Image (tube, rainbow, N blue to C red):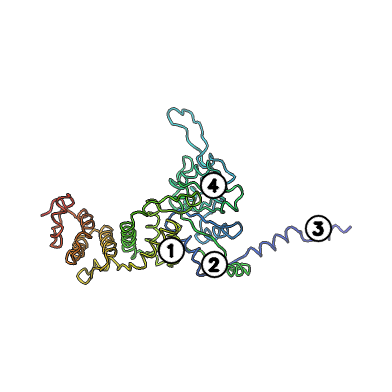
Amino acid sequence: MNITDEDSAPDPLATADELVRRLAAQRAEPAANPQLEALSLAVSANLPVLLWGEPGIGKSAALQQLAAGLRVPLETVIASVHEPSDFAGLPIIGDDPATTGVPMAPPDWAVRLTSAGRGVVFFDELSSAPPAVQAALLRVVLERRVGSLPLPEQVRVVAAANPPSSAADGWHLSPPLANRFVHLQWTHDPRTVARGMAGTWPAVRLPLIDPARMSSAVARARGVVSGFLTARPGLAHHLPGDAEGRGRAWPSPRTWEMALRLLAVGYAADADQKAVAAAVIGAVGDGAGLELLNYLEQLDLPDPDRVLANPDAFALPKRGDRQLAFLTAVVSAVQSDPTRRRWEAGWTVLAKAVDAGVPDVAARAAADLAALRDTDWPVPSGIDAFLDLLQLSGALPGAH
């Protein structure tokens, strides 16, 4: 036997591992992918996201790409194999529990994320977690606390679930837990998979928010959602009657707040409309979401900041729902930057509703605008038509 030859022979496991490493080497390229962009939009808005899809279609891989693109750590927690105490914390008795209480020790993944100050926590197999575990996760998702440890603001929460029909020991999500997520249906595109096998996958990037757009984006989003719910009050809260529907997206004040945030981020980042639509439907459900998007398509609101810059050149929309949505957006824009000039411009806009013969449409906006007044500001002439209403309601203190 030639010992020297055996010693110099390549290690079979080392060479196999080198081959696997070469296969793992991949690159990312910009590509239009609405579901990835919807995920990025919800993550940017700091909303918990739940990816629904069959096993093996790339939900975990998408999270790895997201974390790599953000250059933040990713902590994967398989929800189905954990106990409730793994999320609620394990009690630790100190020297004097009667004085200091009994703190709840967090698990190691929460400590690592807190030490990093940012990151993504990925709760996989959520639909396979029993109800007791889902209940313990409520506090993590809603309050962002694990045991006694608060998660940093820049830690994002993403989960994945398989439909109960294809999940091992699958459960429908409880309504309180389901109502805290933006639900995204995760599917595979054969062309994307084919290109990925060649070593190139679509890049995952967060939408870039333009600071110059923020004030207008917030105002437009508030006008849209407030105007829509005023027109469709029955959709403010609607709990589905079946267990499957209650375990997905459905409209509630909480999820409308989520839709509001998604729209604002979408406006401020000039995000892809398909991505915004997918995210909004994922927040409030198919029925309410599609109605909102149809309403939004017909609304076509002007930029409230531009109108406040030149209110005399603005023509009030003729449709009542557009009038209400726009006046709400104008007041919200003033609230975001409450200067005397913008406040007075707001009254010029509201006065046009009086001139158009619809003072009742502007009444609520007038009360909100009056509440923004600095007591040192004189009352402008545009307020005259609302003076009796505002003084009666006490919305205009110290008028002179």
Left or right: where does residue 196 sit relative to residue 179?
right
Left or right: where does residue 243 sit relative to residue 199?
left
Amino acid carrying label 3: it is Asp
Closer to viewer: mark 1 or mark 3: 1
Quick one: SS at disc 4? helix
Residue 162 is drawn in which quadrant? bottom right
Amino acid carrying label 4: it is Trp
Q: Nearer the viewer, residue 3 or 176?
A: 176
Mark 4 vs 2: CB contact within 8 A: no
Residue in the picture at 51% in, 48% down: 173
Q: Earlier in the sequence, mark 4 or mark 2?
A: 4
Q: Earlier in the sequence, mark 4 or mark 1?
A: 4
Measured Cα–Cα span from mark 1 to mark 3? 62 Å
Residue behind mark 3? 7
Q: Earlier in the sequence, mark 1 or mark 3?
A: 3
Mark 4 vs 3: CB contact within 8 A: no
Q: Nearer the viewer, residue 298 or 270?
A: 298
Closer to viewer: mark 4 or mark 1: 1
Amino acid carrying label 2: it is Pro
Closer to viewer: mark 4 or mark 3: 4
Residue behind mark 4? 109
Amino acid carrying label 1: it is Ala
Residue in the picture at 41% in, 53% down: 251
The numbered disc on residue 202 is 2
Quick one: SS at disc 1? helix
Q: Residues within 10 Å of mark 1 (few under 14, many from 20)?
A: many
